[in-house]
Structure formats: structure tokens, C-alpha cells
Amino acid sequence: MKCTLCHTPLSQAMDSYYFNCHTCRALIKNKEHYLSDEAEKATYELHNNDVNDIRYRKFVSPITTYISENYTKKTLGLDFGCGAAPVVTTMLKEQGFDIKPYDPYFCCDTEYLNHRYDYIVCCEVAEH
């Protein structure tokens, strides 16, 4: 198995679930314990996210505020891993920004992956 971040071959297992990459120090889950695509999507469908939930909007507001203060409405953005409730996309579109939602389970228009973007949002993505 190789490190999913730096592609170093992984040889030292920490336990039956994780490897420790000595190159980039990442902790990498053993592929034997990955969820199937169906099980992963089912887990995400349990999330109770709503684009109109004021608490959810407040949670992502540091991202949308940063974009609105540092980019113009003529720029193009990608909300990568937007989920079933693309709140960042929704909030920025409400402000007139051009941002495309992409999620492998919920907004799977792979055409969006063939463009160059001025910014890419990955809210609640990297930890998965």
C-alpha cells in the first residue's frame, strides 16, 4: 500500500487500521477498512445539512466571507465535495458569484473537473 498523500510505500502498520507514513507523517487508513461507495454515500445521507439552516450558514461563513473579500464576481470557483446541501455554493451564488458545485455522490457533473478555477472550496472534505 502507498501513502495517499505522497505515494511513499507504507511498511509500518501502527495497528490493524492505520499506517504511519515516515515521509510526510500522515496516518493512512488500511484499504481493507475503507467503506464501499454505497456505504460511504449512505453515511453522508445521514447528515442533516440544510442550505437554509442559519447555524450551518454561520459555520461556513468564514469561507464565504473570505471569498467575497478576496475575489470578484468575475472569478470562477469550485465547491469541491459540496455534499447534498451545497451551502457554500448557495451562499456565494446569492451574492452573485460564479461557483460550481461538485460532489462524487450528489453533484457529479465531472465536466466541472475540466476547468481552471480561481479558487476551490473544500469545506468538510479533507478530514474524510
Image: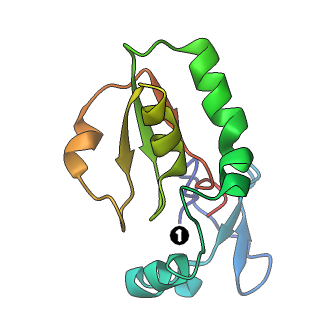
Q: Which residue is mark 1?
A: 1
Bin the neighbour count of mark 1 within 10 Å (Cα to Cα): few under 14, some 14-19, many 20 and up: few
Evaluate whether residue 87 shows in this view.
Answer: yes
Q: Quadrant of residue 61?
A: top right
Q: How many marks?
A: 1
- Seen at 36% across and 68% down, the residue is 105
Residue 21 placed where, x, y %? 71, 58
Q: Is residue 109 left or right of residue 94?
A: left
Nearest to the observer: residue 13 or residue 116: 116
Residue drawn where x is 61% and y is 32% of the image:
64
- Residue in view at x 67 percent, y 59 percent: 127
> Toward the viewer: 75 or 111?
75
Q: Position of residue 100 (x, y in %)?
A: 35, 39
Q: Give the residue type at disc 1.
A: Met
Residue 106 point in image, percent of width and height: 36, 65
Which quadrant is the C terminus positioned in? Answer: bottom right
Outermost residue, left side: 111
Task: Tell me the colour scheme of the image.
Answer: rainbow
Left or right relative to 51: residue 96: left
Kindly identify the residue that appears in the image at 48 percent across and 27 percent down.
95
Q: Is residue 82 above or below residue 41?
A: above
Side (left or right) of 85 relative to 38: right
Residue 71 location, x and y as percent?
52, 14
Specify whether residue 23 is in view: no
